[in-house]
Amino acid sequence: MMNETVSNEKHDTGANERHNNYFTKIFTDILMLIELIKSFFPKDLSDIIDYSTIELCPTEFTDEELKKRYADVMIKLKIEGEDAYIHIMFEHKSTDDEGGIDQLRGYNCAQWDKDKKDGKKKRTPIINVLFYHGDGAWKYGHNFSDLYDVKSPTLKKYLMSLPIILIDLNGVSQANINGSIDLATAILLLANIRKNSKYIGKALDKLWSKYSKSEVANIRFMKSHVTYILNTRKSETVEDVTRNIKKPHTGVKVMTLVDEIKKEGIREGISKGISKGRKEREVEIARILKQNNTSYDLIITSTGLTYDEIEKL
Protein backbone atom coordinates (compact mmCIF):
# COMPACT_ATOMS: atom_id res chain seq x y z
CA MET A 1 0.00 0.00 0.00
CA MET A 2 2.76 2.45 0.88
CA ASN A 3 6.36 2.25 -0.21
CA GLU A 4 8.42 5.27 -1.15
CA THR A 5 5.61 7.28 -2.72
CA VAL A 6 1.88 7.45 -2.35
CA SER A 7 0.08 6.25 -5.48
CA ASN A 8 -0.99 8.69 -8.19
CA GLU A 9 -4.78 8.89 -8.18
CA LYS A 10 -4.92 9.59 -11.89
CA HIS A 11 -3.68 6.08 -12.67
CA ASP A 12 -4.99 4.39 -9.53
CA THR A 13 -8.12 2.34 -10.16
CA GLY A 14 -8.57 1.97 -6.40
CA ALA A 15 -8.85 5.73 -5.81
CA ASN A 16 -12.64 5.73 -6.10
CA GLU A 17 -12.85 2.97 -3.52
CA ARG A 18 -10.69 4.93 -1.09
CA HIS A 19 -12.93 8.00 -1.39
CA ASN A 20 -15.99 5.76 -0.90
CA ASN A 21 -14.50 3.96 2.09
CA TYR A 22 -13.71 7.21 3.86
CA PHE A 23 -17.15 8.68 3.21
CA THR A 24 -18.89 5.49 4.37
CA LYS A 25 -16.71 5.20 7.49
CA ILE A 26 -17.53 8.76 8.56
CA PHE A 27 -21.21 8.94 7.62
CA THR A 28 -22.44 5.59 8.86
CA ASP A 29 -21.88 7.01 12.32
CA ILE A 30 -25.25 8.23 13.63
CA LEU A 31 -23.81 11.27 15.44
CA MET A 32 -22.00 12.36 12.29
CA LEU A 33 -25.15 11.88 10.22
CA ILE A 34 -27.10 14.08 12.60
CA GLU A 35 -24.43 16.77 12.35
CA LEU A 36 -24.40 16.53 8.57
CA ILE A 37 -28.17 16.97 8.39
CA LYS A 38 -28.20 19.90 10.79
CA SER A 39 -25.30 21.59 9.00
CA PHE A 40 -26.33 21.14 5.36
CA PHE A 41 -30.05 20.40 5.06
CA PRO A 42 -32.64 23.16 4.56
CA LYS A 43 -33.65 24.46 8.00
CA ASP A 44 -37.36 23.87 7.49
CA LEU A 45 -36.59 20.16 7.01
CA SER A 46 -33.85 19.70 9.62
CA ASP A 47 -36.03 21.37 12.27
CA ILE A 48 -38.84 18.79 11.99
CA ILE A 49 -36.74 15.61 12.00
CA ASP A 50 -36.98 13.41 15.09
CA TYR A 51 -33.28 12.63 15.48
CA SER A 52 -33.91 10.05 18.20
CA THR A 53 -35.54 7.78 15.58
CA ILE A 54 -32.65 7.63 13.10
CA GLU A 55 -31.51 4.15 12.16
CA LEU A 56 -29.16 2.95 9.42
CA CYS A 57 -30.60 0.77 6.67
CA PRO A 58 -28.80 -1.55 4.26
CA THR A 59 -28.24 0.03 0.85
CA GLU A 60 -29.51 -1.54 -2.31
CA PHE A 61 -26.67 -1.27 -4.84
CA THR A 62 -26.14 -4.64 -6.51
CA ASP A 63 -24.34 -3.46 -9.64
CA GLU A 64 -20.58 -3.78 -9.09
CA GLU A 65 -19.80 -0.79 -11.31
CA LEU A 66 -22.12 1.44 -9.26
CA LYS A 67 -20.47 0.23 -6.05
CA LYS A 68 -17.09 1.27 -7.46
CA ARG A 69 -18.29 4.69 -8.52
CA TYR A 70 -20.70 5.65 -5.74
CA ALA A 71 -20.99 5.25 -2.00
CA ASP A 72 -24.42 5.60 -0.48
CA VAL A 73 -25.99 5.77 2.94
CA MET A 74 -29.66 5.10 3.68
CA ILE A 75 -31.35 6.02 6.95
CA LYS A 76 -34.88 5.59 8.26
CA LEU A 77 -36.37 8.21 10.58
CA LYS A 78 -39.56 10.01 11.54
CA ILE A 79 -40.45 13.47 10.28
CA GLU A 80 -43.42 15.04 12.07
CA GLY A 81 -44.36 11.56 13.25
CA GLU A 82 -44.28 9.95 9.81
CA ASP A 83 -41.85 7.34 8.53
CA ALA A 84 -39.46 8.57 5.87
CA TYR A 85 -36.08 7.70 4.41
CA ILE A 86 -33.04 9.76 3.51
CA HIS A 87 -30.81 8.41 0.77
CA ILE A 88 -27.40 10.08 0.56
CA MET A 89 -25.33 9.34 -2.53
CA PHE A 90 -21.67 10.30 -2.59
CA GLU A 91 -20.38 11.52 -5.99
CA HIS A 92 -16.59 11.55 -5.94
CA LYS A 93 -15.64 11.85 -9.61
CA SER A 94 -12.94 14.36 -10.41
CA THR A 95 -15.15 15.77 -13.18
CA ASP A 96 -18.83 16.36 -12.60
CA ASP A 97 -21.65 14.86 -14.65
CA GLU A 98 -25.35 14.14 -14.34
CA GLY A 99 -24.80 10.49 -13.42
CA GLY A 100 -25.52 10.99 -9.73
CA ILE A 101 -28.98 12.39 -10.40
CA ASP A 102 -29.74 9.52 -12.78
CA GLN A 103 -28.68 6.99 -10.17
CA LEU A 104 -30.85 8.62 -7.51
CA ARG A 105 -33.80 8.44 -9.90
CA GLY A 106 -33.01 4.78 -10.61
CA TYR A 107 -32.77 4.00 -6.90
CA ASN A 108 -36.16 5.58 -6.20
CA CYS A 109 -37.82 3.69 -9.06
CA ALA A 110 -36.27 0.40 -7.89
CA GLN A 111 -37.55 0.99 -4.34
CA TRP A 112 -41.05 1.82 -5.57
CA ASP A 113 -41.09 -1.28 -7.81
CA LYS A 114 -40.21 -3.29 -4.71
CA ASP A 115 -43.04 -1.60 -2.79
CA LYS A 116 -45.48 -2.72 -5.48
CA LYS A 117 -44.06 -6.24 -5.56
CA ASP A 118 -44.40 -6.43 -1.77
CA GLY A 119 -48.08 -5.48 -2.07
CA LYS A 120 -47.75 -2.03 -0.49
CA LYS A 121 -50.49 0.40 -1.44
CA LYS A 122 -48.30 3.45 -0.79
CA ARG A 123 -44.80 4.20 -1.96
CA THR A 124 -41.77 4.70 0.30
CA PRO A 125 -41.12 8.43 0.89
CA ILE A 126 -37.44 9.10 0.10
CA ILE A 127 -35.51 12.33 0.52
CA ASN A 128 -32.69 12.34 -2.02
CA VAL A 129 -29.31 13.85 -1.22
CA LEU A 130 -26.31 14.19 -3.54
CA PHE A 131 -23.04 14.77 -1.70
CA TYR A 132 -20.61 16.09 -4.30
CA HIS A 133 -16.88 16.75 -3.99
CA GLY A 134 -15.82 16.54 -7.62
CA ASP A 135 -13.21 18.79 -9.17
CA GLY A 136 -15.41 21.53 -10.59
CA ALA A 137 -18.66 23.25 -9.68
CA TRP A 138 -21.86 21.21 -9.96
CA LYS A 139 -23.75 22.23 -13.12
CA TYR A 140 -26.81 19.98 -13.17
CA GLY A 141 -29.27 21.64 -10.85
CA HIS A 142 -31.20 20.42 -7.84
CA ASN A 143 -33.90 18.37 -9.55
CA PHE A 144 -34.10 15.56 -12.09
CA SER A 145 -36.26 17.92 -14.18
CA ASP A 146 -33.16 20.10 -14.70
CA LEU A 147 -31.80 17.41 -17.03
CA TYR A 148 -34.50 18.00 -19.64
CA ASP A 149 -33.61 20.11 -22.66
CA VAL A 150 -36.84 22.04 -22.25
CA LYS A 151 -37.31 25.79 -22.12
CA SER A 152 -41.08 25.95 -21.68
CA PRO A 153 -41.89 26.29 -17.95
CA THR A 154 -45.40 24.94 -18.62
CA LEU A 155 -44.09 21.81 -20.35
CA LYS A 156 -41.46 21.30 -17.67
CA LYS A 157 -44.13 21.50 -14.99
CA TYR A 158 -45.73 18.31 -16.33
CA LEU A 159 -42.55 16.28 -16.68
CA MET A 160 -41.11 13.93 -14.06
CA SER A 161 -39.69 15.82 -11.10
CA LEU A 162 -37.35 14.59 -8.36
CA PRO A 163 -36.04 17.25 -5.97
CA ILE A 164 -32.54 16.73 -4.61
CA ILE A 165 -30.70 18.23 -1.67
CA LEU A 166 -27.29 19.06 -3.12
CA ILE A 167 -24.29 19.22 -0.80
CA ASP A 168 -21.60 20.69 -3.06
CA LEU A 169 -18.30 20.95 -1.21
CA ASN A 170 -16.92 23.22 -3.92
CA GLY A 171 -19.11 25.92 -2.42
CA VAL A 172 -17.99 25.36 1.16
CA SER A 173 -15.75 28.06 2.58
CA GLN A 174 -13.11 26.90 5.04
CA ALA A 175 -14.07 29.75 7.35
CA ASN A 176 -17.65 28.46 7.45
CA ILE A 177 -16.92 24.83 8.32
CA ASN A 178 -18.65 24.25 11.64
CA GLY A 179 -19.80 21.35 13.78
CA SER A 180 -17.75 18.89 15.78
CA ILE A 181 -14.05 18.66 15.08
CA ASP A 182 -14.52 15.33 13.29
CA LEU A 183 -17.26 16.65 10.98
CA ALA A 184 -15.29 19.82 10.27
CA THR A 185 -12.16 17.79 9.53
CA ALA A 186 -14.05 15.40 7.23
CA ILE A 187 -15.64 18.26 5.28
CA LEU A 188 -12.31 20.05 4.98
CA LEU A 189 -10.56 16.90 3.72
CA LEU A 190 -13.30 15.95 1.25
CA ALA A 191 -13.35 19.51 -0.09
CA ASN A 192 -9.55 19.75 -0.46
CA ILE A 193 -8.33 16.18 -0.85
CA ARG A 194 -6.97 16.75 -4.38
CA LYS A 195 -4.61 19.48 -3.17
CA ASN A 196 -1.12 18.71 -1.95
CA SER A 197 -0.39 17.69 1.63
CA LYS A 198 1.31 20.98 2.44
CA TYR A 199 -1.92 22.84 1.65
CA ILE A 200 -3.98 20.28 3.58
CA GLY A 201 -1.62 20.50 6.56
CA LYS A 202 -1.97 24.28 6.74
CA ALA A 203 -5.74 24.05 6.36
CA LEU A 204 -5.96 21.50 9.16
CA ASP A 205 -3.76 23.65 11.38
CA LYS A 206 -6.03 26.65 10.82
CA LEU A 207 -9.15 24.56 11.46
CA TRP A 208 -7.81 22.79 14.53
CA SER A 209 -6.67 26.07 16.08
CA LYS A 210 -10.40 26.73 16.70
CA TYR A 211 -10.46 23.81 19.16
CA SER A 212 -8.61 23.08 22.38
CA LYS A 213 -5.51 20.89 22.27
CA SER A 214 -7.32 18.16 24.22
CA GLU A 215 -10.15 18.14 21.68
CA VAL A 216 -7.73 17.83 18.77
CA ALA A 217 -5.71 15.12 20.50
CA ASN A 218 -8.89 13.05 20.98
CA ILE A 219 -10.44 13.24 17.51
CA ARG A 220 -12.58 10.11 17.19
CA PHE A 221 -11.87 9.47 13.53
CA MET A 222 -8.21 10.50 13.53
CA LYS A 223 -7.06 7.17 12.07
CA SER A 224 -9.64 7.42 9.28
CA HIS A 225 -8.59 11.00 8.50
CA VAL A 226 -4.88 10.11 8.40
CA THR A 227 -5.49 6.98 6.31
CA TYR A 228 -7.56 8.97 3.82
CA ILE A 229 -4.84 11.60 3.41
CA LEU A 230 -2.09 9.02 2.99
CA ASN A 231 -4.05 6.91 0.52
CA THR A 232 -5.03 9.73 -1.80
CA ARG A 233 -1.77 11.63 -2.31
CA LYS A 234 -0.34 12.22 -5.76
CA SER A 235 3.37 11.47 -6.09
CA GLU A 236 4.24 12.42 -2.51
CA THR A 237 6.29 10.31 -0.17
CA VAL A 238 4.71 9.09 3.03
CA GLU A 239 7.43 10.94 4.93
CA ASP A 240 6.59 14.26 3.23
CA VAL A 241 2.87 13.79 3.86
CA THR A 242 3.48 12.89 7.50
CA ARG A 243 5.68 15.93 8.03
CA ASN A 244 3.08 18.22 6.46
CA ILE A 245 0.05 17.00 8.41
CA LYS A 246 1.48 16.42 11.90
CA LYS A 247 1.03 19.34 14.29
CA PRO A 248 2.49 20.10 17.73
CA HIS A 249 -0.67 18.86 19.45
CA THR A 250 -1.06 15.75 17.22
CA GLY A 251 2.50 14.99 16.11
CA VAL A 252 3.11 11.89 18.23
CA LYS A 253 -0.37 10.54 17.55
CA VAL A 254 -0.09 11.07 13.79
CA MET A 255 3.35 9.41 13.71
CA THR A 256 2.01 6.42 15.64
CA LEU A 257 -1.00 6.14 13.33
CA VAL A 258 1.18 6.34 10.23
CA ASP A 259 3.33 3.46 11.50
CA GLU A 260 0.21 1.46 12.31
CA ILE A 261 -1.32 2.14 8.89
CA LYS A 262 1.91 1.19 7.11
CA LYS A 263 2.07 -2.09 9.04
CA GLU A 264 -1.53 -2.83 8.11
CA GLY A 265 -0.60 -2.15 4.50
CA ILE A 266 2.24 -4.66 4.73
CA ARG A 267 -0.06 -7.24 6.29
CA GLU A 268 -2.60 -6.61 3.54
CA GLY A 269 0.10 -7.05 0.90
CA ILE A 270 1.30 -10.32 2.48
CA SER A 271 -2.29 -11.57 2.67
CA LYS A 272 -2.89 -10.71 -0.99
CA GLY A 273 0.36 -12.42 -1.95
CA ILE A 274 -0.62 -15.60 -0.12
CA SER A 275 -4.06 -15.55 -1.73
CA LYS A 276 -2.54 -15.05 -5.18
CA GLY A 277 -0.14 -17.95 -4.68
CA ARG A 278 -2.93 -20.22 -3.44
CA LYS A 279 -5.08 -19.27 -6.43
CA GLU A 280 -2.26 -20.00 -8.89
CA ARG A 281 -1.75 -23.42 -7.26
CA GLU A 282 -5.48 -24.21 -7.52
CA VAL A 283 -5.46 -23.25 -11.20
CA GLU A 284 -2.46 -25.49 -11.88
CA ILE A 285 -4.09 -28.44 -10.11
CA ALA A 286 -7.34 -27.86 -12.01
CA ARG A 287 -5.47 -27.75 -15.32
CA ILE A 288 -3.80 -31.12 -14.62
CA LEU A 289 -7.10 -32.69 -13.53
CA LYS A 290 -8.85 -31.37 -16.62
CA GLN A 291 -6.13 -32.76 -18.90
CA ASN A 292 -6.79 -36.14 -17.30
CA ASN A 293 -10.51 -35.86 -18.10
CA THR A 294 -11.54 -35.50 -14.46
CA SER A 295 -15.16 -34.49 -14.00
CA TYR A 296 -15.84 -30.80 -13.44
CA ASP A 297 -17.69 -31.58 -10.20
CA LEU A 298 -14.60 -33.26 -8.75
CA ILE A 299 -12.32 -30.42 -9.95
CA ILE A 300 -14.63 -27.86 -8.32
CA THR A 301 -14.63 -29.85 -5.06
CA SER A 302 -10.83 -30.24 -5.15
CA THR A 303 -9.84 -26.68 -6.04
CA GLY A 304 -12.73 -24.35 -5.26
CA LEU A 305 -12.67 -22.94 -8.80
CA THR A 306 -15.94 -22.19 -10.55
CA TYR A 307 -17.27 -23.97 -13.64
CA ASP A 308 -16.49 -20.93 -15.80
CA GLU A 309 -12.91 -20.71 -14.47
CA ILE A 310 -12.32 -24.39 -15.29
CA GLU A 311 -13.89 -24.01 -18.72
CA LYS A 312 -11.41 -21.25 -19.59
CA LEU A 313 -8.35 -23.35 -18.73
Image (tube, grey):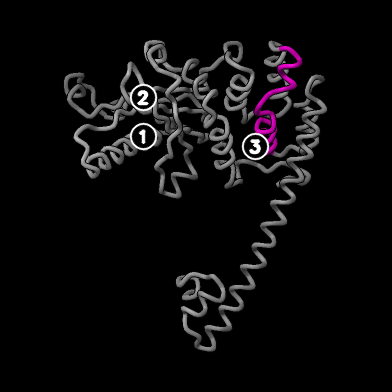
Query: In whole angstroms, how far apart are the C-alphas of marks 3 and 1?
Result: 26 Å
Quadrant position of residue 292: bottom right
Kindly identify which residue carries mark 2. 164
Q: Left or right: where does residue 303 sit relative to residue 248?
A: left
Q: x and y percent of residue 91 in the render?
A: 47, 33
What amino acid type should be assigned to the residue bearing mark 2? Ile
Q: x and y percent of residue 237 in the render?
A: 77, 38
Disc 3 residue crowd, few under 14, some 14–19, many 20+, Cα 10 Å: many
Residue shown at 69%/28% (left/top)?
A: 222
Residue shown at 43%/39% (left/top)?
A: 58
Instruction: Pick whichever, 2 or 4, lies toward us.
Output: 2
Assign a secondary structure to mark 3. loop
Query: In whole angstroms, how far apart are the C-alphas of marks 1 and 2?
Result: 9 Å
Label 3 or label 1, whichever lies nearer to me, is: 1
Task: Please tell me whether residue 287 belongs to the stretch shown in magenta.
Answer: no
- Label at residue 24: none
Instruction: Say whether disc 1 or disc 2 marks the residue closer to the N-terminus.
Output: 1
Instruction: Pick whichever, 54 or 95, lies toward us.
Output: 54
Magenta residues span 212-234
Kindly identify which residue carries mark 3. 232
Is label 1 in contact with label 2 (beta carbons under 8 Å)? yes
Q: Left or right: where does residue 212 sit relative to residue 66?
A: right
What amino acid type should be assigned to the residue bearing mark 3? Thr
Kindly identify which residue carries mark 1. 104
